[in-house]
Image (cartoon, helix red, strand yellow):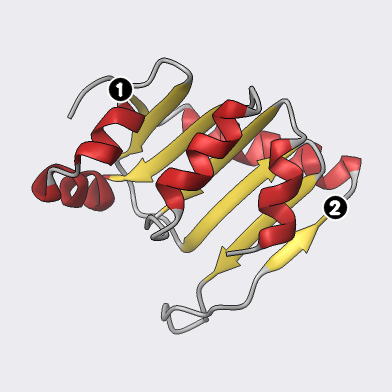
Amino acid sequence: MNQDFCDKTKESDAVYQITTYFHPRFPSLIEGWIKHNVNVSIIITEELYSKVKEQADRHLYDLITDERIKFYVYPKKMNFVSFACNDYGILFRLLMKTGTYNNKQLMCCNPTARQWGKEFFERYLKDSLLLTDI
């Protein structure tokens, strides 16, 4: 978890995230962002959506059905771990060439990176389905 990025998100108008997993602190982070009136849009994989349904986690269910948060399901394979974009920049967690997890992060904080990040999110969004219930 990149604490600097999470803190800057609280100061942002919006955060756009694409992820293949939920960090254990995910629910509390999202709650903190919406308390600061941040618009939250999250794209998750079908695999992650299936796990959420199987676990029947009430906390996650409440977040997914919260009107202030938009969840989407992406039906295709993602070749990265996670991506996030806020008003200050982007944060990427990439896979290694072998396709295995790598805990290194790529963070870029400038207006060009933010614009690129928004466009990147929108490319995934166009193939995603809005999630309204579990």
Left or right of 85 on screen, residue 131: left
Q: Residue 33: horizontal and vertical position, in percent? A: 59, 35
Q: Which mark is residue 1?
A: none
Which residue is labeled 2 in the image? 109
The furthest residue to the bottom: 98
- For label 2, the crowd category at 10 Å Cα-Cα, with few meaning under 14, some 14 to 19 and many 20 or more, is some
- Which residue corresponds to the image point at 64% horizontal and 27% vertical from the top-left? 38
Left or right of 104 on screen, residue 71: left
Which residue is labeled 1 in the image? 65
> Identity of the amino acid at label 1?
Thr
Q: Residue 110: horizontal and vertical position, in percent? A: 90, 47
Q: Residue 117: horizontal and vertical position, in percent? A: 70, 42
Q: Secondary structure at mark 2?
A: loop
Please state, as top left, top right, bottom left or bottom right, where the N terminus lies in the image.
bottom right
Q: Relative to 9, say whether 130 is above or below.
A: above
- For label 1, the crowd category at 10 Å Cα-Cα, with few meaning under 14, some 14 to 19 and many 20 or more, is some
Q: Relative to 68, say whether 127 is above or below.
A: below
Q: Considering depth in this image, is 69 or 42 the residue closer to the camera?
A: 69
